[in-house]
């Protein structure tokens, strides 16, 4: 069987063929991969089912075989539209044959409509030349490249194929770190892991992601259940995604992982797809919700209109987009009745998504929400003239946040349900998410908090310097960073729980480090080994020719000797480069393993020291929240000040004296030198 490392690198190698030739080339590659998988597996399913039946019943006749084959397949592939049919099509018919094949498969399998046929393979070139947007030569090259890999269950299980697909998605996101596209479909795996392990999906749980992107939260919830309950189908998965290509990626992701997730297409706020069967206006509720919604989405209700000046000219913002004005706030009513804590400003959708998520939770449901840190402190409380010399009404966002901590109020300002549903808050390192530099946080919601935490909120400050690996375009949480954050969340300050948790997680995190090492070694293999083999063959060829000359009793010329020397040097240099690359990744892996051990010591030391704890987290009660006017800005509760390095004063004085003496000696030497010159 192929390894996921080898398959992942093979698939990403195909990206080099497409890069720069079409926009959003990942859609071309991922749908082609999906078509190959369906076709390969169709043939494998046929052979496998017949073999199983013959093993049980003996030799079968044609009629019996046809009856078995009629029920053998997860998806129908119409005759003449298999991968081999496209591969064997003439070059000038290749695009049309591929386009027709994926559309015929979509027609035969309604569940694949808009999934396998997202790309128009026969789209005309925009220059009017009569050619294709993607040339037949490129399509043929892609098909030949992928044709060598068997993607059936015989060679690539759903785990291997699904993990390789996710690896490919991450690679696409990494390529677009600074752009906006990556953030639409990918949440860093490390953040997903922390959230899933704190929420702990249970057997039979219904898990929902209202802005699911490529489906990472849902996939990882299922993987968690497979590890803990033996099957990934222990949970039911639901997701909604508004961007068409991203929705298709999520659907493919589910199928390749062998999961039955229900992924719907549409705008979650304006057109939520998951409602109760007997009431289209009642939001369906789930056990768990996990989401990374679009940060600070403007015009979330689509009721904004461009602002115009007195001359009727549209007023633009600094980025060139029009300023918007919003109407209808007074008459607004959400038909799905989700905004029980207050109507968010139309210019910022953060609390619209948060309230949709809360409305989507069962009475004992939990949620993990990635959101901008602004939701923790934006908005101001009401102030009277006696308090600060001004009359100011409370902002909408302040009222919503207060409601999450204190309970919603009715039109008269009376509490309808005095409940704090915020369980924990994690402030994350900056520049951690794709496509945005807005600082992020995780908001954990629990509608039925345990009694001893009912009026408390755990606040974790994970944005400390050094708590993420800094890279040019973005920061990355390393395994030891994940351990640090998850341990503080899990333990809530209890050192015994922390020690048990660390013991449980260490081996799993070592596994993540090893898996990452295996991927990097596979990449190094792919980068160097073909050239090493070529240079080895070249050296053998040169040595063979020189040996033949010497066998004839002739002496090698200097030029001929140099040929061998150069060939050896080229091979040795490349082998050394490969070894250096391997040494680097091995050293990085070892550093990460040591990092886990260091964090273990750091956390236990911290939990034993009440003063040190204050720099990591705080458990805040309702009274303190009220004193801070429900502002959840972490520095109000956690000591985020980075202490300066302590200096030994006596040592510093001695060092200063030594430097002063050296300066005096240098000055005297300079004077003597100048006197000698002048004399």
Image: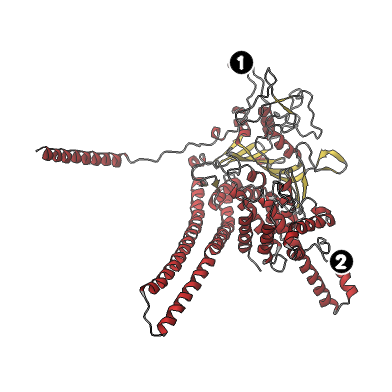
- Per the model, the C-alpha gap separating discs 2 and 1 is 77 Å
- Residue named by callout 1: 390
Question: Which quarter of the figure has residue 306?
Answer: top right
Toward the right, the furthest residue is: 63
Q: Taking the image as drawn, is residue 1 in sight? A: yes
On the rendered image, what quadrant is the N terminus found in?
bottom right
The image shows residue 473 at horizontal and vertical percentages of 54, 45
The image shows residue 466 at horizontal and vertical percentages of 49, 45
The image shows residue 52 at horizontal and vertical percentages of 81, 73
Looking at the image, residue 543 sits to the left or right of residue 56; the answer is left
The image shows residue 182 at horizontal and vertical percentages of 63, 46
Q: Tell me the crowding category of disc 1: few under 14, some 14 to 19, or many 20 or more residues within 10 angstroms, Cα based.
A: few
Q: Earlier in the sequence, mark 2 or mark 1?
A: 2
Badge 2 element: helix
Badge 1 element: loop
Name the one closer to the observer, 618 or 356: 356
Q: Tell me the crowding category of disc 2: few under 14, some 14 to 19, or many 20 or more residues within 10 angstroms, Cα based.
A: few
What colouring style does the render use? secondary structure
Q: Taking the image as drawn, is residue 162 in sight? A: no
Name the one closer to the observer, 654 or 357: 357
Question: Mark 2 against mark 1, which lies toward the viewer?
Answer: 2
Toward the left, the furthest residue is: 679
Toward the front, the furthest residue is: 129
Name the one closer to the observer, 557 or 497: 557
Name the one closer to the observer, 103 or 455: 103
Residue located at (56% from left, 61% from top): 523
On the rendered image, what quadrant is the C terminus found in?
top left
All told, the count of numbered labels is 2
- Residue named by callout 2: 70
**Label drawn at residue 497:** none
């Amino acid at each position: 069987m192929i390894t996921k490392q080898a398959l992942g690198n093979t698939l990403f190698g195909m990206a080099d063929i497409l890069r720069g030739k079409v926009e959003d080339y990942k859609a071309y590659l991922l749908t082609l991969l999906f078509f190959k998988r369906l076709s390969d597996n169709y043939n494998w399913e046929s052979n496998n089912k017949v073999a199983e039946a013959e093993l049980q019943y003996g030799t079968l006749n044609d009629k019996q075989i046809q009856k078995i084959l009629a029920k053998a397949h997860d998806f129908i592939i119409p005759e003449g539209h298999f991968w081999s049919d496209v591969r064997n099509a003439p070059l000038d018919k290749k695009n049309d044959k591929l386009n027709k094949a994926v559309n015929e498969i979509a027609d035969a399998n309604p569940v694949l409509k808009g999934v396998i046929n997202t790309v128009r393979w026969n789209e005309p070139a925009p220059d009017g030349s009569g050619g294709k947007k993607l040339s037949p030569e490129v399509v043929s090259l892609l098909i030949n490249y992928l044709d060598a890999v068997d993607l059936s269950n015989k060679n690539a299980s759903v785990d291997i194929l699904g993990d390789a697909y996710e690896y490919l998605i991450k690679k696409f996101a990494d390529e677009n770190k600074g752009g906006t596209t990556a953030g639409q479909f990918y949440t860093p795996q490390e953040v997903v892991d922390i959230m899933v392990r704190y929420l702990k999906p249970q057997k039979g749980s219904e898990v929902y992601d209202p802005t699911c992107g490529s489906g990472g939260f849902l996939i990882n919830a299922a993987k968690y259940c497979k590890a803990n309950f033996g099957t990934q189908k222990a949970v039911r998965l639901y997701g909604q995604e508004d961007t068409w290509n991203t929705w298709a990626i999520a659907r493919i992701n589910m199928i390749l992982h062998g999961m039955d997730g229900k992924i719907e297409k549409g705008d979650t706020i304006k057109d939520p797809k998951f409602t109760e069967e007997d009431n289209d206006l009642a939001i369906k509720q789930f056990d768990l919700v996990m989401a990374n919604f679009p940060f600070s989405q403007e015009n979330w209700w689509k009721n904004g209109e461009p602002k115009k000046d007195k001359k009727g000219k549209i007023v633009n913002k600094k980025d060139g987009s029009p300023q918007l004005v919003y109407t209808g706030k007074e008459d607004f009513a959400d038909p799905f009745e989700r905004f029980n804590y207050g109507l968010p400003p139309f210019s910022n959708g953060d609390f619209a998504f948060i309230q949709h998520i809360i409305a989507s939770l069962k009475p004992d449901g939990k949620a993990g929400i990635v959101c901008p840190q602004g939701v923790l402190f934006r908005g101001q409380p009401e102030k009277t003239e006696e308090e600060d010399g001004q009359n100011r009404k409370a902002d909408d966002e302040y009222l919503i946040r207060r409601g999450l901590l204190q309970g919603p109020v009715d039109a008269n300002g009376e509490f309808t349900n005095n409940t704090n549903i915020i369980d924990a808050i994690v402030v994350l390192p900056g520049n951690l998410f794709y496509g945005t530099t807005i600082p992020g946080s995780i908001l954990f919601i629990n509608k039925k908090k345990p009694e001893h935490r009912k009026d408390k909120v755990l606040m974790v400050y994970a944005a400390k310097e050094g708590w993420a690996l800094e890279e040019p375009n973005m920061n990355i949480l390393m395994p030891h960073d994940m351990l640090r954050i998850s341990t503080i969340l899990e333990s809530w300050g209890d050192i015994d729980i922390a020690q048990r948790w660390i013991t449980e997680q260490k081996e799993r995190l070592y596994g993540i480090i090893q898996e990452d090492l295996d991927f990097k070694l596979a990449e190094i293999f792919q980068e160097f080994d073909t050239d090493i083999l070529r240079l080895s063959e070249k050296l053998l060829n040169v040595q063979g020719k020189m040996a033949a000359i010497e066998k004839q009793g002739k002496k090698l010329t200097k030029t001929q000797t140099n040929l061998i020397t150069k060939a050896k040097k080229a091979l040795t240099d490349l082998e050394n480069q490969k070894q250096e690359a391997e040494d680097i990744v091995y050293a990085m892996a070892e550093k990460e393993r040591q990092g886990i051990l260091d964090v273990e010591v750091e956390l236990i030391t911290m939990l034993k020291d009440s003063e040190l704890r204050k720099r990591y987290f705080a458990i805040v009660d309702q009274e303190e929240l009220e004193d801070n006017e429900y502002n959840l800005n972490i520095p109000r509760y956690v000591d985020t000040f980075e202490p300066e390095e302590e200096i030994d004063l006596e040592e510093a004085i001695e060092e200063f004296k030594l430097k002063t003496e050296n300066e005096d000696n240098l000055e005297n030497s300079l004077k003597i030198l100048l006197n000698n010159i002048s004399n």
